[in-house]
Image (cartoon, grey):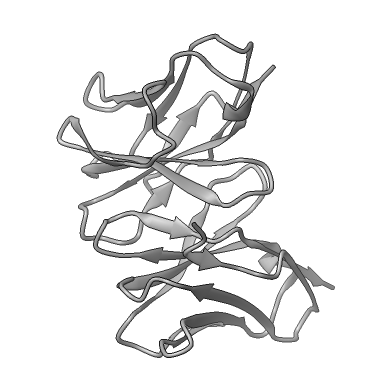
Amino acid sequence: EPEVTQTPSHQVTQMGQEVILRCVPISNHLYFYWYRQILGQKVEFLVSFYNNEISEKSEIFDDQFSVERPDGSNFTLKIRSTKLEDSAMYFCASNRDRFTYEQYFGPGTRLTVT
Amino acid sequence: DQQVKQNSPSLSVQEGRISILNCDYTNSMFDYFLWYKKYPAEGPTFLISISSIKDKNEDGRFTVFLNKSAKHLSLHIVPSQPGDSAVYFCAAWGSNYKLTFGKGTLLTVNP
């Protein structure tokens, strides 16, 4: 069964450093998402991406964040200058089209900013 | 901005009994409501959904009930099994094409 994969599973970085979180969505899916979950909090939407551009972003997704689909398979989230409060679990998700409510999630990357 | 609320952070039930997980929402424009299940070190996995025009959807041991007038939905698991122990997220989907999640409820099913 196809699945969304994410690497790395755990990333530790120092405050102010740049990080790139990687995702490989399901191959025939067209919409891609990033969500995050701060420990003990709800899963929060960050951004959706379609046809090589951002469809929607939340207020959390400020200028420090960017997304890219550098090739036909990877979907990345970059945080330019990490802050302590960026420490969270980051989930990538995908679905076939924007009208399909069921999204398939990857296992997540735990980002720890020290 | 808590459009989707799960007020119980945890629930513990005995194997074989019914588990009832609750969720409230504030936005009446949501089109679908979903339940996701999450095990440690894994991403959320889709469990069951319900359209806003229905009041019940059943799939095996899992049934979701929707009360639109109360803006409330619940997930019933019967009979509960130890393998059902996980965090359950209520989520809503609407015209903005994104999922809005609750904080989750940790279900523990004791053998």
Please, which residue is most extreme toward the left here?
A: A51
Q: Nearer the viewer, residue B80 or A92?
A: A92
Q: Nearer the viewer, residue B103 or A32?
A: B103
For the point 39% across and 71% down, which residue is it?
Answer: B27
Task: Tell me the quarter of the picture where residue A3 sits.
Answer: top left
Q: Nearer the viewer, residue A23 or B99?
A: B99
Left or right of A10? Residue B44 is left
In this view, B45 is above or below A83: below
In this view, A25 is above or below B8: above
For the point 44% across and 14% down, which residue is it?
Answer: A80
Residue A92 is situated, as x and y percent measured from the top left of the image, at 42, 39
Residue A69 is situated, as x and y percent measured from the top left of the image, at 26, 25
In this view, B86 is above or below A46: below
Left or right of A106? Residue B9 is right
Residue B101 is situated, as x and y percent measured from the top left of the image, at 49, 58
Task: Tell me the quarter of the picture where residue B69 sits.
Answer: bottom left
Image quarter of the C terminus of chain B: bottom right
For the point 39% across and 28% down, which residue is it?
Answer: A62
Residue A88 is situated, as x and y percent measured from the top left of the image, at 60, 34
For the point 44% across and 36% down, which residue is it?
Answer: A60
Left or right of A111? Residue B4 is left
Task: Tell me the quarter of the picture where residue A112 sits.
Answer: top right
